[in-house]
Structure formats: structure tokens, C-alpha cells
Amino acid sequence: MTVPASSARGRAAERASIVAIDWALIAIAWLMVEFLALAFSGRRGPTGMLLTAEQILDLLHYAWALLGGLGLAAAWSALERVLGSSPGRSLTGGVPASEAELPWSQTVRGWFAAVFIELTFFTGWLITELELVTFLTKFGKAADIVRGLAHPSASVLHEGLILLVQTIFLAFMATAFAIPIAFVLAFPSARNLTRGSRLARIGYLVSRTVMNFVRAVEPLVWALIFISWVGIGPFAGVLALWVHSVAALTKLYSEQIESIDPGPMDAITATGASTLQVLRYGVVPQVIPPFLSFTIYRWDINVRMSTIIGFVGGGGIGYILKPRVDLGEWGEVGTLVLLIAATVWVMDILSAKIRERIV
Amino acid sequence: MVYPGGVRALAGVDLEVREGEFLAVLGLSGSGKSTLLRCINRLIDPSEGRVFIFGREVTALRGAELRALRRQVAMIFQQFNLVKRHSVLSNVLSGALGRSKLLPSLALAFPAAERERAVGCLERVGLADRAESRADALSGGQQQRVAIARALMQQPELILADEPVASLDPALRHSVMRHIEALNREEGLTVLCSLHDIDLVARYATRLVALRDGRLVWDGTPAGFDRATFKEIYGEEAEPASGSGMG
């Protein structure tokens, strides 16, 4: 039931968004051309060395690229008759059918895309400092690490096993505390339950925004925050994984609520039941099995994450792994890595089996 | 009634239903039958127009008042809409939610009197022996009978039935329709039932209205509505759905 953008205002808005997309793409292409030109110009920096990628990024003329990009995007929009549809138009889905059937090599837009991809690849090669020769010739140094990993040392096995238990419980507690909060937050975060009133729509927006933000911050960063709050140790790790799990589970749960069959909700509403009763009878029974499945999956992810969280002081097996990596005790590192791999592997199988049973 | 996006589902329907009637609403898919029924208990809010039940303006009610009115109006759906993972008995008990205490009902607990009444409702539809089964373990016809028991449990004065037999095997249609007919004849409940099968209309309804493109195009007794009238209203292309051959 989409309303076609028939009004003049709608057409203007569509054209503006097309030009905006073209502007961004052309400006990026422009900058990549300048980057590659500088890189291959042989120009040297103040120390007499060839310019590094970071120095080149510093030298680029961003304002010119934006200005030129805007000019070219506007020109393309004006000369659409001659040049054919622009990338912006094809991304907004407005390419005429006659043009959409042409092979890419017969459209300006196709050539632009091809050149854009090439530019991205070469620029990316330089910016990430890929050095194929080094990769192929300097294996020697890494060889003793691999040798060490392949000869795990038993000296750390005892301590490793004890911290492994801590790791698994750390993940479990983080998941367990996340369940009730995510369960409650999932309802105001589900679109289909929040159309009723203005208050509900505001609740939806607030909950979604906060949860997206919390989820965007990595658990390692949360761990740093909680370590300065409650000190180094597994408790900080539990809190870090808990916060992240609440956000992740809320998203998974609410998406599940959005996909339920609305029929039972209608039926319960029609009996004169109140909102809570409609949720209890019309929604909850439909989402319990998938909720269980998501929760176990989340525990699985948390076990994986809790092995790393110790790197910054969040407890668990990572806590003793980090100093051994720093000291180059590769045999002991090998033992710990094997323990982690085995745990993750077992959790993976277990969680898959349990989830198979539930759904 | 206009849906977001500009689809006008109902226009200028002026309809008065008398107490105790079994009113059939006939129409092709998309003719507005479901919308009409759902406007009556406000599962859909009509964009304009007013609906009165028992002298009260439903379209003006809010919150607790609306819920109180819904208790008097039970609904039966084409897809049964049972809580599949709950027991048959729990599904019937959910008909009593409107008059139940909130906290116990959230724990799925109901007073003994209500439980007895629910068993009684199941006996009426011949499913008392399946009370403990999970709802989705029952056949389609049985599930619709559970939905009828749930409607009965509600102790309503009006029944809205939206294509109650359309997703059932033709051989089972009459067994379900007879239960709805019993609610009308024995309990004296007013029934509004949308159907697309004119044989069922002729057999069960006391009055018939027909909808086309959201407009009321026929109002009268089922006896005056034959296949010729059907073709006249819905066009030569439309073939009236035929009954099950039973009954």
C-alpha cells in the first residue's frame, strides 16, 4: 500500500536524495583518485621517506572533493537524458525498465561502478598496508609460535581448568541476569505492540535507540568501564557481558514478538481482556520456545566472549592468557588456546542440540 | 472505513441488526465482511461512522468501558485463533478473562466455579474429554468447536463469526455451523456471521445482507436470494460456492 510520490514535493525530495547519494559516491571516487595519484607520484615527506598512507590521507583536498562531487552530481542530474540514470537513481530504485536491461558496459552508471570498485580495491590495498612479499617470506619468526602452540605445556593446565570453570559461570550469570530485563524490555521494543498510543510509540523509540547504542559498544569497552567501577575480576566481566546481552536479547526477543501470529491476540482482545492479559495469553505462549532458543544461543556467544574479556581484566581464562602472550610462553598459550577451543566447540554442539529440541 | 494507504473497505453501510437474529453477511473476498465485523467490537477503529450495540455507541468508548462492552460480544474467527500451546480448557477459560481478577489470570489460575463452567461449555460442543489436550493437537473442526466454547464461556449477548467454516473440510462445516445455530436458537444470542457459501446461508440464517466493494447491495431473507440473484450481484464470472453435500 505504498503511495506513489506523485506530488511535486515528493518528486523534489526524491531528486534531492538521488543527488545526495551521487554526491557522496562521486566525492569518494574523487578522493580515491587523488589518493592514488599522490601515492604513485613519488612525492617524499619532510623526512625524505616516501609518504605513508596516513600522511597522504592528511594531504587530501577534502573541500575540493566535496565541491567537485556536488558539481558533478548536479551535472549528472541535469544531463540524465544524455548520461542515463545515475548510481543514486539506481540505488533508489527509479531506473527505467529500458535502461535496467542494458548490460553494465553500455551505461555510464555501469562504468562508474566498475571504476569505483577498482579504485576502492587499490586504495584499500595501500591504506591497510598489504605487503604480499613480507607475508610470503617472513614466516620464520611466527614458526616458533606455531611450534609452541603445537606443543602445549602441561604446567598451566591446572590453573587453566579452574579459570575455565570461572569463564563458563561468568557467561552463565551474565546471560541469566539479562533474561528478565530483556524479557520486559522486548514488549515496548516491538513495533506491532506499540502502535496503539503516542506514549507507546515514544517508548518504542526510546527503548530501540538506547538498546542500539548499548549494543554498538563492544563488551570489551563495557568491561573497561565496569573494571574501574567494581575493580578487576570476574564480576566486572559478568557486568560487561550482562549489559551487552540485555541489548542483544531485547533485539532478538522483540523481533520474535513482531513476527507472531496476530490472530490469538485479536481473539483475546475480543473477550474484553486487558492489555496485560492480552500479552500473557495472546503473545507470551507464542514466543516462549524461540526465546529459550535465543537465550541458549546467547549463552554460547557469551562463553566465547568471556574467554576474551579477561584480556582487559574482566576475569576468566583470558586473564592468564594475556601475560603469557606478552612473555612469549607459547607452549602455555597453546594449552590455554586448546582449552578455549574445546569449550567453545562443546558449547556450540550443546546449544545446537538443545535448540533443535526446543523449536 | 478507510485503511492507511487509502483503501476504502466499507462505505455507507447502514445496517440495523435485531435482537435474536441470525444474520448472514455474504460477499466475495475483499468485499468488506471482516472489516464490518471487526468494526463492531472495535478490533478495527472505523475512520468514520458510528456503531451502536444495545443502545451504546461503541465507537465512542475508551479503555475499561470498551473492554466491558467487548465482554458482551464474543468473536469466532476463520483461523480459530486459539492459544496453540495452551490446553483446551485453558483456551475456554480465556473467554472469562474480561471478568477475572488480573493477577491470578496472569498465572493462568481461575476460580473453581469458572473451571466448572468451562467444562460445561466443552460438554456443549462435545469435547469435554479433550479438556487437557494441547489445543494444536486437535483437528481443525475440533479447534473451531473449542473456539465456540470459548465464545460461550464469555456469556455474551452477541456473537460475531468471521467465516467460521471457511478453513474447514466441507464435510465438517455443518457440525460447526450447528453449534453456532444452537447458540442462536437455544441461548437466544444474536449472531452476525460472514459466509461465502449460499447453501449455508439458506440453511442457517434468518436474514441475509450482501456486500460488494464495501457497499450493502442486498438485504432480505435467505429464501429470496438464489443463484440468479448471486450472479446478478457479483457478475457472471462469480460462481456461488457450493455446500458440502451433507445436511
Image: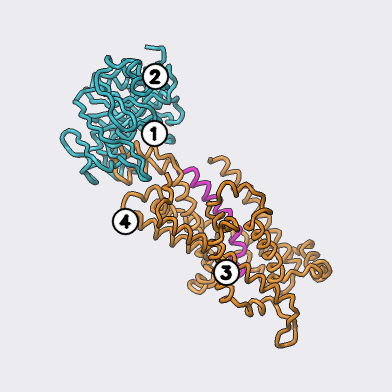
- Which three-letter amino acid code belongs to the residue tagged 3? Gly
- Which three-letter amino acid code belongs to the residue tagged 1? Asn
Q: Residues within 10 Å of mark 3 (few under 14, many from 20)?
A: many
Residue mark closest to the camera, 4 vs 2: 2
Q: Earlier in the sequence, mark 4 or mark 3?
A: 3
Q: CA distance from mark 3 to mark 1?
A: 56 Å
Q: CA distance from mark 4 to mark 2?
A: 47 Å
Residue mark closest to the camera, 2 vs 3: 3
* Mark 2 lies on residue: B240
Q: Position of residue B31 (x, y in %)?
A: 35, 31
What's drawn in magenta, residue-wise? Answer: A287-312
Chain orange in the figure, letter: A
Q: Secondary structure at mark 1?
A: loop
Q: Position of residue A226 (x, y in %)?
A: 50, 70
Q: Secondary structure at mark 4?
A: helix
Residue pictured at 17% horizontal, 37% vertical:
B56
Please state the chain letter of the residue tagged with numbered disc 3 in the rendered image. A
* Mark 1 lies on residue: B81
Side (left or right) of A281 relative to A40: left
